[in-house]
Image (cartoon, grey):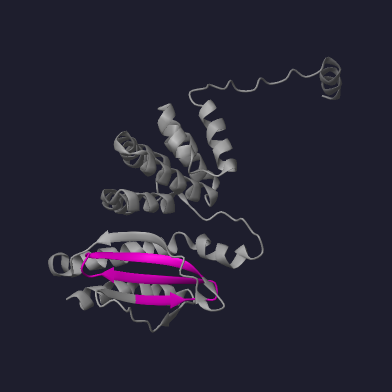
Amino acid sequence: MQKKAFGIINDKVGKTLTERGFISQKVKSENTDELVSLYTSEHAAYSVIYYTKRKRVDLRLCQMTEDGPDNDWKTLADWMFDAELDGEKEANSIGNDFVDIIVGPSKLVNSFAKKKKGNNETNVTSLFLANRFANMFPEIKSEIQFEKEHYSDFRAVTFTKEKILPRVQAMIKTANKNDLLKFGKFINDMYDGADADSRALIMMLIMNSIDDVQVRENIYEGLTPNILKIAKESYKLKNKKFKPEKKKKQPRYVADTLNAKR
């Protein structure tokens, strides 16, 4: 049943990737407790790996080099999965989720191709950001799926406020310094590659919700100097109200000239 379930997930991923120019590679894990598939293109590699003992299946992505995958794998999504108990229905659901993730953050793959040229094109969209938070808070995976099924567009602000933010706030209440440092590094990685909308969600909603000075300082340790500066400046703007710019009065001599032309 494990191989059959893995095949269901892998078939969905494989079909989507081959349509996008990826090639399926024959690969076998040295660990007998793992089922693995690998798909490569010129610039990127995707892998689906099922840890049968740990009962978890991951979708991973890394950059390609001349010698093959660089093996600096980034986990895009992971699901707890017991093939014997969860069955084909859950396998289909996981496969569909992986497909949505592959189709969603395509800019991440494109960025690998442009990285050598020093191109800093953003790649983290609000949906991709939500999926990354789902790795931290697995219970929101079903909520992301519900959002995609019931709304034509992903409601990034609403979802972040209602689903992600409360969990972040609950997490930091019990987190130790090392946990907060890791969270800071997570925020740093996300912000560094995020589009404008996702950067606003990260700083103005998530980071600005953290009022405890010591907690913020511990998280700040995980940020690069540039992003640290942005975080501090963003927090200064919290709760500030900005008056709309007043319309400037037209100079008298201009008004007289315009009136004369009427």
Residue at x-position 26% and y-position 52%: 142
In the picture provided, is 178 more to the left or to the right than 79? right
Quadrant in which residue 249 is drawn: top right
Quadrant of the image containing the C terminus = top right
Locate residue 50 relative to residue 75 in the image: left or right.
left
Taking the magenta stretch, the answer to whether it contains residue 48 is yes
Taking depth in this image into account, of 59 and 261 the one nearest to the observer is 59
Q: Which residues are magenta?
A: 37-63
Q: Residue at x 20, y 68 (%)?
A: 53
Horizontal and vertical percent position of residue 198: 49, 45
Q: Position of residue 85 (x, y in %)?
A: 13, 65
The magenta stretch spans residue 4 = no
Query: Is residue 23 visible in this depiction of the protein?
Result: yes
Q: Quadrant of the N terminus?
A: bottom left
In the image shown, does 182 or 48 lie closer to the viewer?
Answer: 182
Work out whether 103 lies above or below 148.
below
* Residue 210 visible, this angle: no
In the image: residue 193, left or right of residue 144? right
Q: Position of residue 140 (x, y in %)?
A: 29, 48
Task: Report the residue at 51% width, 43% height from top.
Answer: 223
Question: Is the residue 112 above or below the residue 18 in the image?
Answer: above
Q: x, y (%) of residue 171?
A: 31, 39
